[in-house]
Amino acid sequence: MEISDQLLCLFSADVREEGDRYVVEIPRREVKTGGVDPNGTYRVALISADDGSESSEESATETETPPDQPQPPVEPGETRYVEIEDIGKQGDGIARVERGYVIIVPGADIDERVKIEVTEVKSNFAVGEIIDEV
C-alpha cells in the first residue's frame, strides 16, 4: 500500500454511530502537535485495521530499502517522542510515524507516550529503545 507524502497524521480510531451519521474522533494530540487544524477541511482515508501488514520483527525480513522505494523516515541514533498505538504479537509496543512507518518499542504499553532512541532501521520498520517516559 502506498501512502501519500502529504499525510499529516496517522492514528487508530473506531467508527461510531450517532443518529443518522457515523463519527470518527481525531485524538487531541493530533491537534496539539500541529498536524490538524480544528477548523480545517481534510480528505480522509480509512484503512482496515486488519490490512495483513503484521507489525512484528518476525514478519519484517527486508534489510535494505531499494533505491526506487521511499526511504525510512528515521535514522539510527535519532531520538523521537512517540505514542504507542498497538501491541505486537511478541508483546512489544508499536508506534507509527510518517507515512505509517512502524517503530517497535520493547517494554512499552499501549497509549503510553515515550521518548525513544532509534537503535535499528529496516526498510519497513525500526526498533526504538525507551530513554524517557513522558
Image: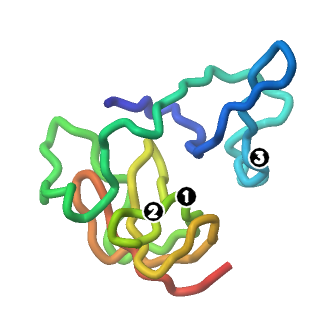
The quarter of the displayed image where residue 125 is located: bottom left
Q: Nearer the viewer, mark 2 or mark 3?
A: 2
Q: Is residue 3 above or below residue 64?
A: above
Q: Quadrant of the C terminus?
A: bottom right
Cα separation between marks 2 and 1: 6 Å
Q: Which residue is mark 2?
A: 94
The local crowd at label 3, few if under 14, some if 14 to 19, many if 20 or more residues have their Cα within 10 Å, is few
Where disc 2 sits, the SS reads strand
Identity, as a three-letter code, of the amino acid under mark 2: Ile
Q: State the residue at coordinates (68%, 43%).
A: 35
Q: Label 1 near label 2: C-beta < 8 Å? A: yes
At 17% from the left and 49% from the top, the residue drawn is 65
Q: Position of residue 117 (x, y in %)?
A: 43, 78
Q: How is the image coloured?
A: rainbow
Element at badge 3? helix
User: For the residue carrying disc 2, how many other residues have a C-alpha within 10 Å: few (<14), some (14-19), or many (20+)?
Assistant: many
Per the image, the residue denoted by label 1 is 85
In this figure, which residue is indicated by the disc labeled 3? 31
Earlier residue among tags 2 and 3: 3
Residue 18 in the image: state x and y as whole percent: 84, 24
Depth check: 103 or 109 in front?
109
Q: Residues within 10 Å of mark 1 (few under 14, many from 20)?
A: some
Q: Quadrant of residue 104?
A: bottom left
> Mark 3 is on which residue type?
Val
